[in-house]
Amino acid sequence: MDMLDSRAAAGLPYAAHRGKKEIVVDMRLELVPLPSADVDRSKAFYVDQVGFTLDHDVEPGNGLRVVQLTPPGSACSIVIGVGIRDPHAAPVLNLHLVVDDVDLARRTLISNGIDVSDVNDMGGGIRYAYFSDPDGNSWALQQIST
């Protein structure tokens, strides 16, 4: 048993790839900044149409506005606002929302006025549908069935 296998067996953190420098610090992706030219329009899109929870909408001063939104069931949020990113920055592409039923998720978004692609069956139980927000940030609804 090598060092990585023994660390795993002992329940200790270890680098995921052999031959890489070992990193034992937890790193959680919890917030993704998205560009938004119109914060109120984006907030309405994510809350009213996609169904994200509004966590924060604060203006701490100096012209800064922070709007944090979280998809249902997710530990990772998005943030839009003023002073967060250049509102004219290139959109963020192909963010994944993992769902149990891509057909249901697609129908729900369509019923809320969102243009969602047809479901693409990639084989092996992997299915996708795609949509974008008003600023061109794109999302994939991903279902993986085993």
Image: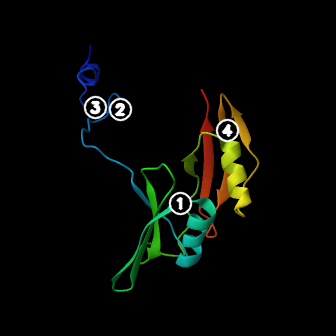
The quadrant in which residue 128 appears is top right
Measured as percent of width and height from the top left, residue 12 is found at: 23, 29
Q: Are marks 1 and 3 in contact (CB under 8 Å)?
A: no
**Label number found at residue 16:** 2
Q: Is residue 3 visible?
A: yes
For mark 1, give the secondary structure.
loop
**Label number found at residue 14:** 3
Question: How far apart are labels 4 and 1 at the CA level?
Answer: 22 Å
The foreground one among 51 and 3 is: 51
Measured as percent of width and height from the top left, residue 126 is found at: 64, 34
Looking at the image, which residue is at 51% across and 53% down? Answer: 72
Given the image, on which type of amino acid does mark 3 rest?
Answer: Tyr
Is tag 4's residue or tag 3's residue first in the polypeptide sequence? 3
- Other residues around mark 4 within 10 Å, as few (<14) / some (14–19) / many (≥20): many
The foreground one among 130 and 40 is: 40
Give the foreground label among 4 and 2: 4
Given the image, on which type of amino acid does mark 2 rest?
Answer: Ala
Question: How far apart are labels 1 and 2 at the CA level?
Answer: 32 Å
The color scheme shown is rainbow
Q: Which residue is mark 4?
A: 127
Is tag 1's residue or tag 2's residue first in the polypeptide sequence? 2
For mark 2, give the secondary structure.
loop
Q: Quadrant of the C terminus?
A: top right
Given the image, on which type of amino acid does mark 4 rest?
Answer: Arg
Above or below 66: residue 8: above
Q: Would residue 10 be found to the left or right of residue 31 on screen?
A: left
For mark 4, give the secondary structure.
strand
Question: How far apart are labels 4 and 3 at the CA level?
Answer: 31 Å
Q: Which residue is mark 1?
A: 52
